[in-house]
Amino acid sequence: MTTIADETQPLLRQRTADSVDNKSVTQDDVVVDFDADGDDENPLDWRPAYKWGIVALLSFISFTVTFTCLSVVPVSTHIVDELSHGHGSKSASVLLVTIWELGESAGPLLIAPLSEIFGRYPVFNVANVLFIAATILAALCQSTPLFIAARALTGLAVASNVLNPAIVGDMFVSDQRGSAMSMVMLAPLVGSAVGPAIAGQVAQSLGWRNVLWMSVVLAGTGEIVFLTYFRETYKVAILKRRAARLRAESGNPQLKTVFGDADMKTETQHKFWDSIMRPAVVFYSSAVLQAMSLFGSLLFAYFYIFSTTLPDILEQIYGLSPAKTGSTFISISVGSAISVAVINRTLDGIYIHLRTRNKGIGEPEFRLPLVIIGGFTVPFVVALYGWTAQAQLPLWVMVLAIALLGMTTMLGFIPLLTYVVDAFKLHAASAMTAVIVTRCLMGTFLPLATQPLVDRFGYGWGFTVLAAASLFVAPIPVLVFRYGVRWRLLSKYTSEE
């Protein structure tokens, strides 16, 4: 049972000169902290049922985001044709799908630092409201440019991919975070399967606008629950508000948190600017991060390349309806789920085995064997997809190729993220932001170059060119696995052993 502390008598301790690590906290200040014996405001001390309820809520929001993102994929061409009165282009339908990633690339640069200044609760709620408003705008718009702009705004307002891991980290100790993160990561896989499948059925019978109104209902329901059920989880924000409340009640200006509470305006400006610039600084200083980001972003971009070309292939070559086209996307999620299961069962085991062979010394590079496998199998899957469409092979071959896409891309991408976290340690959040931004930019623009390749060379040779590009970058994780320990020492952000 969690002990509920008296908020009027919090844990106050005198700060000594040896322990002062913040210029705004002096040795004469009294520090406000959580009660070590149990504190109702400490997220780590919350009841397990409540914490898992928040995890379920975060999973639902992640599902809604993925559902909204991918629900328009099977009918993107039809949306552009309707909004442009039959004069739409393929590039417009591709941009309609991928522009989401461009908006989402800017989100982490704003959402993460804002959450460190104001806390998770206000930032997540504001982002959710903006997400709903942008989705409503997309449902009501009457032109293709406005629809594309609304999709970009929707991607910009996505807070779940940035804040979900942080919120889980706020509530759970390290050895309990794995299960919670697995549940949160499973939701997008479900959404990527259910979204296109339902959207195809609804769009065919009721029209594509009703698909977006479904997203509005889902997001609105999630926001109502979030607004009423969720509590602030960020320790810094909780303690600073507690200290401010106690200063007002007691009139004692020396009540402060260990993080410092003086000159909040100047602190906010500096912290916001530093948080925005830090990912760029970390990215610029680390050749390893640059190389792995290039590899991972190309790997992830294939998901959008397949998503924007598959509807045309299924409808024009295989004669499927929008409803059946949407259902075919389930195979991507099936392949992704298989890959996630393989990763969960083998990633830690491979690391432990390699650590044992290395005389008990663990290295982040020991996370890369699965990335290497994924990197060298993706090119063959890409070529298989293109030549299956070119040769008009049976539909089951195409479905198999789609499932293999989900399996190989996740096999290469998820362990890569684990490597980045292990390699950058205290700077992992900034490194992850750099990876997300690079991934989103590649996912936005590379699919736009795919259609000219297909128009010029056909599906077979067009996707062979893309496969060759993948084969060109496939050795990157091999080189990092072999020489990464030495290369990481060249950057101060990865030099700590």
Image: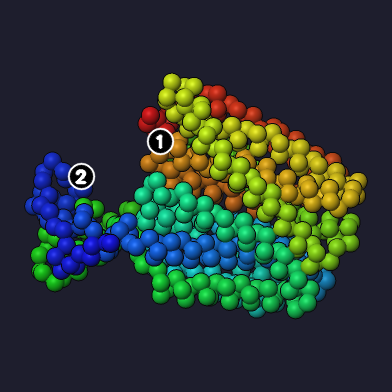
Query: Quick check: 96 above or below 465?
Result: below
Q: Earlier in the sequence, mark 1 or mark 2?
A: 2
Residue type, numbered disc 1 = Tyr
Between 380 and 154, the one lying in front of the other is 380
Which residue position holds label 2?
Answer: 21
- Secondary structure under tag 2 reads loop
- Image-based side of 319 in relation to 204, left or right: right
- Secondary structure under tag 1 reads loop
Query: Are circles 1 and 2 on residues that touch, CB within 8 Å?
Result: no
Residue type, numbered disc 2 = Asp
Q: Quadrant of residue 378?
A: top right
Q: Tell me, for residue 301, which label it has, or none.
A: none
Q: At 10% across and 69% down in the image, what residue appears?
A: 251
Quadrant of the frame with the N terminus: bottom left
Which residue position holds label 1?
Answer: 493
Q: At 42% across and 55% down in the image, what residue appears?
A: 168
Image coordinates for residue 293, horizontal then vertical, percent: 56, 40
Q: What is the distance, in whole Å, between disc 1 and disc 2 at their CAs? A: 21 Å
The crowd level at tag 2 (other Cα within 10 Å; few <14, some 14-19, many 20+) is: few
Q: At 23% across and 58% down in the image, what residue appears?
A: 38
Q: In the orientation shown, which residue stands out farthest toward the front?
A: 1
- Image-based side of 495 in relation to 372, left or right: left
